[in-house]
Image (tube, helix red, strand yellow):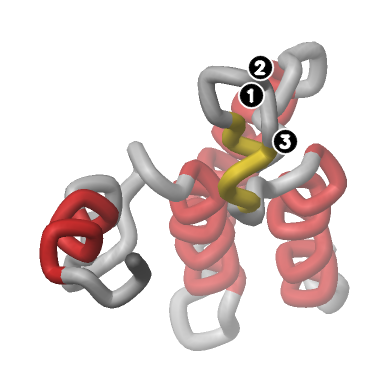
Amino acid sequence: MWGDVAEDDRLTRYVEVGSERSLDDDPLYGFRQLVDIADRALSPGTDDPTTAVQAIDHLHDLLRRIVGCELPNGVHTDDDGRPRLFVHEPSWQEFLDVSVDEVAITSSSQP
């Protein structure tokens, strides 16, 4: 029965709650961190093009590594193959958008 303590305990074994995002559970987070580094390095107050280029090079390398990979679709099935859980997994387009869009806008005023 739903709401039963034993049932709730069984379900919560599969849920992990943390205080912050992790690279293991959220690979898009690593891309986001590199974008933040590039953006800060390109800001007029910092003006550190070498760091920006390094961050962009790492983003490029990561994109090259995943372009041919089959990314998870977020559908988790039971032993009989029936879908039981749907989780958002980032698509190739999301990785590309995060890696390129903001850096392109931030760098548009740079030579």
Between residues 79 and 29, which one lies in front from this camera angle?
79
Element type where label 1 sits in the image: helix
Q: Which residue is mark 2?
A: 65
- Whether residue 89 sits left or right of residue 96 in the image: it is left
Three-letter residue code for mark 3: Asn
In the picture, measured across the screen, residue 54 lies left or right of residue 80, that is left
Q: Residues within 10 Å of mark 2 (few under 14, many from 20)?
A: few
Which image quadrant for residue 64? top right
How far separated are the C-alphas under marks 1 and 3?
23 Å
45 w.r.t. 109: above or below = below
Q: Give left or right: position of 3 versus 66.
A: left
Percent from the top left, x then y, of residue 96? 80, 46
Q: Residue at x 71, y 30 (%)?
A: 63
Element carrying mark 2? helix
Q: Which residue is mark 3?
A: 73
Cβ–Cβ under 8 Å for marks 1 and 3:
no
Side (left or right) of 23 relative to 33: left
Quarter of the image that includes the C terminus: bottom right
Most foreground residue, 77 or 72: 77
* Three-letter code, disc 1: Asp
Helix, strand or loop at mark 3: loop
Q: Position of residue 105 (x, y in %)?
A: 82, 74
Residue 102 image position (x, y, % from top left): 74, 70
Evaluate if marks 1 and 2 touch, with contact meaning CB atoms under 8 Å apart.
yes
The crowding category of the residue bearing disc 1, from other C-alpha atoms within 10 Å (few below 14, some 14 to 19, many at least 20), is few
Give the image location of residue 95, x and y in percent.
Answer: 72, 46
Q: Residue furthest bottom?
A: 45
Q: Look at mark 1 in the image and give the residue it sits on.
A: 61
* 32 relative to 25, above or below: below
User: Which of marks 3 and 2 precedes in the sequence?
Assistant: 2
Callout 3 crowding tier (Cα within 10 Å): few <14, some 14–19, many ≥20: few
